[in-house]
Image (tube, rainbow, N blue to C red):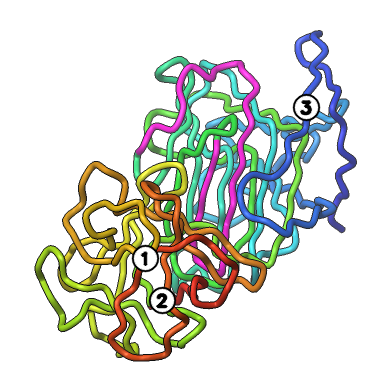
Amino acid sequence: MPKIIKFMFLGLFGGIALTISASAQIDGNNWSSQTVSYNVQWPYNVSESSRFSDSNGIYHCWVYSTDQPFEEGSTTLPRTEMRFNPDLTSGELQYQAMLMCPASDNSYCIMQDHTGDAQSPQYGPVAIMFIWQSKDGGSVWNGYTGQELAKNMGGVWFQLNVDHNLVTHTIKAWINSQLVVTEQDNGASDYYFKNGVYEQNISTPSSVMDTYVQNIQEWTSPGKQTSFLGTYELQVEASGLALNVAGGSMSNGGEVVQYPFGKGSSNAEWTMSETNNGYYQLVNGQSGLDVAVSGASTAREAKIVQWAFGSTGDDQWKPVENSDGSYSFYNLHSGLVLDDPGSSTSQGIQMDQYTFQGKTNQEWEVISQ
């Protein structure tokens, strides 16, 4: 039977009292706290207690490089991991914990977002792995991209948040509340989280590998759009028409209008490229130019055109979610929103910017293509 964790925020490590403050989930909305349960996996030829312990709310996972795998006949490397239940099969799941690894330990996974067992042969076993290495004073790495995520972490408690959104198939991770990973998953529809120790041959493993974990928390949400990676149709609610470049223009100044969406029509498809602070370029799939305000105007009713990316901010937009799940796009330079003038339902009407009024001519459906 799975073991139920009772959270404790005060533990003892090395004789020093550790008060760990719980943080709220990062990013997203409509979160529900989950009771965390797990099964332990450890080398099959030894007892669980010889590789896993729970002392005053601190969970200690360790293996030796000479250990056997977690089940007889397996070809995997030694591991002692907490496998969390249930699997993620819809919506969004976020994991948070405080972790600590000795600086001298090397070459093992401390946390992984694993593909569901039945889907692993098709999609690959792991969506993302977080690897511990002894170099750079103890460091955390993205196991698949080889990116170093944090350094000088040896012997230091740090907070790891990992968020998997199945609506957008996006994985995001934070170390000490700093965003360090944003990437697409491997396309499966079933995943589970694990933390602990799982030896890797990225560099020479140390003879013993340890991970200490406490304050493990998980939350779920319906998984609304929280980041935008990929190509989208932008459909205004008032007319049901889509943002489009008139006549398929490839030139600066081409009018940005509304028009019926045609699947595969690249002049009606937009890539959202994040700049900073939640703002995005809206890049046309055909011309490669951005949605911009004509003349970088800050006036209401200024017309919307396409233009090469510049420095004034009139070609950067922040999507802000409305109560019905649609988005309004606020311009960085003017503070006004992308607007269907007069709530027109006519094809070919050029868009403008206007003060936000909470009406459907300023509310856009962001539809993945």
Image quarter where the N terminus lies is bottom right
Q: Is residue 12 left or right of residue 292?
A: right
* Marks 2 and 3, how far apart at CA: 49 Å
Q: Which residues are drawn in magenta?
A: 147-174
Q: Which mark is residue 21?
A: 3
Identify which amino acid the numbered label 2 is placed on. Answer: Pro
Secondary element at image label 2:
helix
Q: Which mark is residue 254?
A: none
Image marks 1 and 2: residues in contact by CB distance under 8 Å: yes
Secondary element at image label 3:
loop
Q: Residues within 10 Å of mark 2 (few under 14, many from 20)?
A: some
Q: Residue at x 58, y 42 (%)?
A: 111
Instruction: Give the residue at mark 2.
Output: 341
Q: Residue at x 50, y 40 (%)?
A: 130
Residue 108 point in image, percent of width and height: 51, 35
Residue 240 point in image, percent of width and height: 46, 87
Foreground of the two, 111 or 19: 19
Image marks 2 and 3: residues in contact by CB distance under 8 Å: no
Q: Which mark is residue 301?
A: 1
Q: Please state which of the two labelled residues, at mark 1 or mark 3, is closer to the viewer.
A: 1
* Marks 1 and 3, how far apart at CA: 49 Å
Q: Inspect this view and state whether residue 126 appears.
A: no
Q: Is residue 309 left or right of residue 202?
A: left
Quadrant for residue 165, please give it: bottom right
If you read the primary sequence from the N terminus, does the residue marked by circle 1 or circle 3 appear first? 3
* Marks 1 and 2, how far apart at CA: 8 Å
Q: As drawn, which residue projects farthest toward the top?
A: 15
If you read the primary sequence from the N terminus, does the residue marked by circle 1 or circle 2 appear first? 1
If you read the primary sequence from the N terminus, does the residue marked by circle 2 or circle 3 appear first? 3
